[in-house]
Image (cartoon, helix red, strand yellow):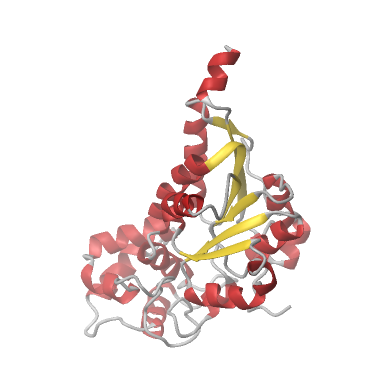
Amino acid sequence: MTANTHITVLLEEATKALLVKKDHWYIDATFGKGGHTQKILNAGGKVIAFDIDKAAISSGKEIFASSIVPGNLILIRENFAQIFPVIQSLKEDRQINEIDGVLFDFGTSTEQLKSEDRGFSFDGDSPLDMRMDDRLGVQAKDLLALIPADQLEELFRDLGGETDARKIARAIKSSPVPITTTKQLSNLILKISGKQKGKLHPATKVFQALRIAVNTELENIMMGLPQALEILAQKGRIVTIAFHEGEDREVKTTFKLWEAENKGENLTKKPVVPTAEEIKNNPRSRSAKMRIFEKNTSDQQKNEIE
C-alpha cells in the first residue's frame, strides 16, 4: 500500500453502525473510492452513492458496474446538501423505497489531496483551484485575491487552526504579484513559518482552510444533516465520520439538539475513534471521529405510547 493510496477509515465500525439489512436502501453521501459502499453491498444492502467529484463517479461506474446493472447501486453526481430532492425524485420514479441509513465520511481522499493538477497539494506546482466540483465558480486563488486581509486571517485561523494566520494573510495581500499557484503559496508560508519541523508541512493548515472555504464544506454539513434525517425511515441511522474539529462540532451540536427535540437518540455521547492498530496502519486516520444518531419513532406512535 503506497502513501498515495486511499484507505477508508473506520470501515468496519461505520458499516456495523448502519445495521445493514439485506435488500434495504442506504445512502453513502460521500462515495469517494467506494470503500464504504462496497462494504454495504457486501453485507446485502443497496446503495445510493453521492459524490461531487466527476472523477470519483466515473471511476465508480467502471469499478462497480456489476452492482449498478442489477440495480443494487445508484451513483449520483451531486452534493449531499441536495440529498432530499434527489431521494424524493428517486422515490417518485419508484427506483427506491425507504432509506434505512445515511453515511457521511467528511474526509478527503488521498488521491484528491495528492493530485498535483487540482491545487490541493503543496508538493507540486499547479493552479490554486481546490474545487472538488469543477462546476463551482470560485477557486482558491479567487479567495486570496478578493477577500480582505482581516477576513483571510479569520479564515486561516478558524478553518485551519493556523497560528501565523495574520502574518500569512498580510503577506498574501502585500505580495507584488497575485498568488495563483500552489508553489507560490507554499513558498510564502515557508518564509513566514520556517522549514518543516515535524510530520506536518507548514502549509498544511492554510491549504486545509482554503479547501474547506472553496467547497463550503461546513455549510454543506449544516444543510445535509437535516435533509438526511428527513428522508430517513423510522429507527434508521445517520453515521458521520469527521476529521476536522469544525466538522465534528457541527455534528455533535446537531445530534444533541435533535435528541433534545425528541427526534431520536444520540448513540455516541463520546465519538468512536480508530484503534491504535488502524492509526499505525493509516496515520491519516488519527483525527477521525465517528458519531451515530438513530431516528425516533413517529410523533403519532409516540402519542399512542403516551
Residue 37: x, y in percent? 65, 61
Residue 125: x, y in percent? 43, 88
Q: Is residue 129 above or below residue 35?
A: below
Left or right of 64, for residue 275: right
The residue under the point 48% across, 70% down is 204
Asked if residue 241 shows in the view, the reply is no
Q: Quadrant of the C terminus?
A: top right
Asked if residue 72 shows in the view, the reply is yes
Q: Nearer the viewer, residue 198 or 27?
A: 27
Residue 228: x, y in percent? 50, 46
Q: Nearer the viewer, residue 303 or 132?
A: 303
Q: Is residue 98 above or below residue 164?
A: above
Q: Quadrant of residue 40?
A: bottom right
The residue under the point 29% across, 68% down is 169
The residue under the point 62% across, 48% down is 290
Left or right of 161, for residue 197: right
Q: Quadrant of residue 147?
A: bottom left
Q: Is residue 176 above or below residue 53?
A: below
Q: Nearer the viewer, residue 22 or 145?
A: 22
Left or right of 275, for residue 240: left
- Image label count: 0
Q: Quadrant of residue 210?
A: bottom left
Residue 35: x, y in percent? 67, 65
Q: Is residue 23 above or below residue 229?
A: below
Q: Which residue, as the protein is rendered here, is positioned at the far top? A: 306
The residue under the point 47% across, 32% down is 257
Q: Quadrant of the N terminus?
A: bottom right
